[in-house]
Amino acid sequence: VYTVNIRRLIPDEAAVPLPLFFGFLGLINMIMLAPIVVILHYTGQENLSSLSGETFALICAKGLIDNVVSDYLWALAVLLTTPTVATIGLSLTIPLAIVSDLVLHEILPTMASVAAAVFVVIGFMTINLASNEQAAEQARTNMVALRDVDDDGSPSLLDSNVRDDHRHRR
């Protein structure tokens, strides 16, 4: 829902600056979720009294680096591709995690993990190819709609009213 609404409400990345969009999104989240944090603190579910200023600053820095940058890049991918391709692209973290475990920690993946990673990559490639074919078909449809044929059979990009006016002037 989130992905589709971003694409629907912001059809062009030049129409709304993404940093402003995510700034407002963060502000709304902070306003809506701050009362929940306060309630959790006063009911004893979370103890915020031991939270130092340094820890709070590190939490904010981590949030900026992890969430803001990744969400910005993801939203840009949604606007530059399609919501489906961008969301399926996020699933590529699964095969990347398997490869990083193998390379960095020498953890051998199970056959199920390898099969899952292969299916994720195949799914991403299939969705991406389908989106490319759909975009190419849409471009062909738009070109056919723009083209028109004059009496002599030559293609014309003129609107029919303009073409009729042009014929009357001859």
Image: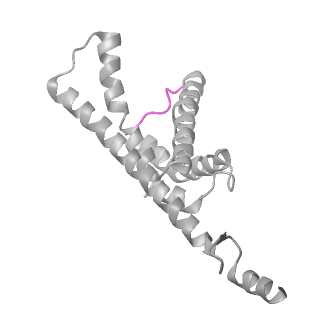
Identity of the residue drawn at 19% across and 31% down: 115
Percent x, y of residue 122: 29, 38
Q: Nearer the viewer, residue 10 or 120?
A: 120
Percent x, y of residue 20: 67, 48
Percent x, y of residue 148: 62, 74
Locate the N terminus by quadrant.
Answer: bottom left
In the picture, residue 99 is in which quadrant?
top left
Q: Is residue 166 depicted above or below 63 in this figure?
A: below
Q: Nearer the viewer, residue 120 or 101?
A: 120
In the picture, residue 154 is in which quadrant?
bottom right
Identity of the residue drawn at 48% across and 52% down: 82
Q: Is residue 5 depicted above or below 26 in this figure?
A: below
Number of numbered markers: 0
Seen as rendered, the residue at the extreme left is 111
Residue 167 lies left or right of residue 33; in this view the side is right
Seen as rendered, the residue at the extreme right is 169
Seen as rendered, the residue at the extreme bottom is 168
Locate the C terminus by quadrant.
Answer: bottom right
Percent x, y of residue 27: 61, 49
Identity of the residue drawn at 42% across and 44% down: 40
Q: Is residue 122 depicted above or below 138 in this figure?
A: above
Majority secondary structure in the magenta region: loop
Q: How is the image coloured?
A: one colour
Q: Magenta residues, as a range?
A: 45-51
Is 84 magenta? The answer is no
Q: Is residue 93 depicted above or below 155 in this figure?
A: above
Identity of the residue drawn at 73% across and 81% down: 163
Q: Nearer the viewer, residue 18 or 136?
A: 136
Residue 86 lies left or right of residue 20; in this view the side is left
